[in-house]
């Protein structure tokens, strides 16, 4: 069971990195400092951006559950 949640945690971590990097910059942060703020915003978020937000929140929930489950399993097995 620990191996299962370890694999889920690893996959969710990699997916979180990819999904967060896919988001467009909101401005005023590090993305502006390195030239990421050059693109123009077309006002509002698109359907694709909202779906990306929903997927990111879902993967973050899976990540959090797997962290808690691993912590509980490791505590019980010790």
Image (cartoon, rainbow, N blue to C red):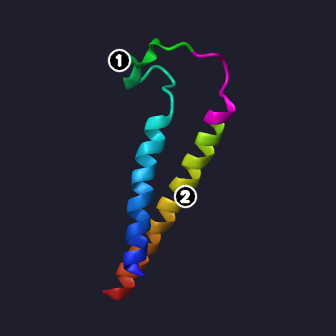
Magenta-span inclusion, residue 48:
yes
Where does residue 51 sit, x and y in percent of width and height? 64, 41
Element assignment for label 2: helix
The residue at the point 50 percent across, 14 percent down is 39
Choose top left, top right, bottom left or bottom right for residue 41: top right
Mark 2–mark 1 Cα distance, whole angstroms, equals 31 Å
Which label belongs to residue 22? none
Q: Quadrant of the C terminus?
A: bottom left
Task: Judge whether residue 67 can be spotted in this image.
Answer: no
Where does residue 36 sit, x and y in percent of width and height? 41, 19
Of residues 48 and 29, the one nearer the viewer is 48
Where does residue 61 sit, x and y in percent of width and height? 55, 58
Where does residue 13 sit, x and y in percent of width and height? 40, 55
Establish if 74 lies above or below 67: below
In the image, the segment drawn in magenta is 41-49
Of residues 37 and 73, the one nearer the viewer is 37
Name the main secondary structure of what is drawn in magenta.
Answer: loop
The residue at the point 66 percent across, 18 percent down is 43
The residue at the point 69 percent across, 33 percent down is 47
Which label belongs to residue 33? 1
Choose top left, top right, bottom left or bottom right for residue 77: bottom left
Point out the residue furthest to the bottom here. Answer: 77
Q: How crowded is mark 1: few (under 14 residues within 10 Å), some or many (20 or more)?
A: few
Residue beneath disc 2: 61
Q: Earlier in the sequence, mark 2 or mark 1?
A: 1
């Amino acid at each position: 069971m620990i191996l299962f949640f370890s694999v889920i945690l690893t996959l969710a971590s990699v997916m979180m990195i990819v999904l967060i990097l896919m988001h467009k910059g909101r401005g005023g942060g590090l993305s502006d400092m390195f030239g990421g703020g050059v693109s123009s915003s077309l006002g509002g978020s698109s359907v694709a951006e909202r779906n990306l937000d929903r997927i990111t929140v879902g993967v973050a929930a899976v990540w959090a559950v797997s962290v808690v489950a691993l912590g509980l399993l490791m505590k019980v097995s010790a």
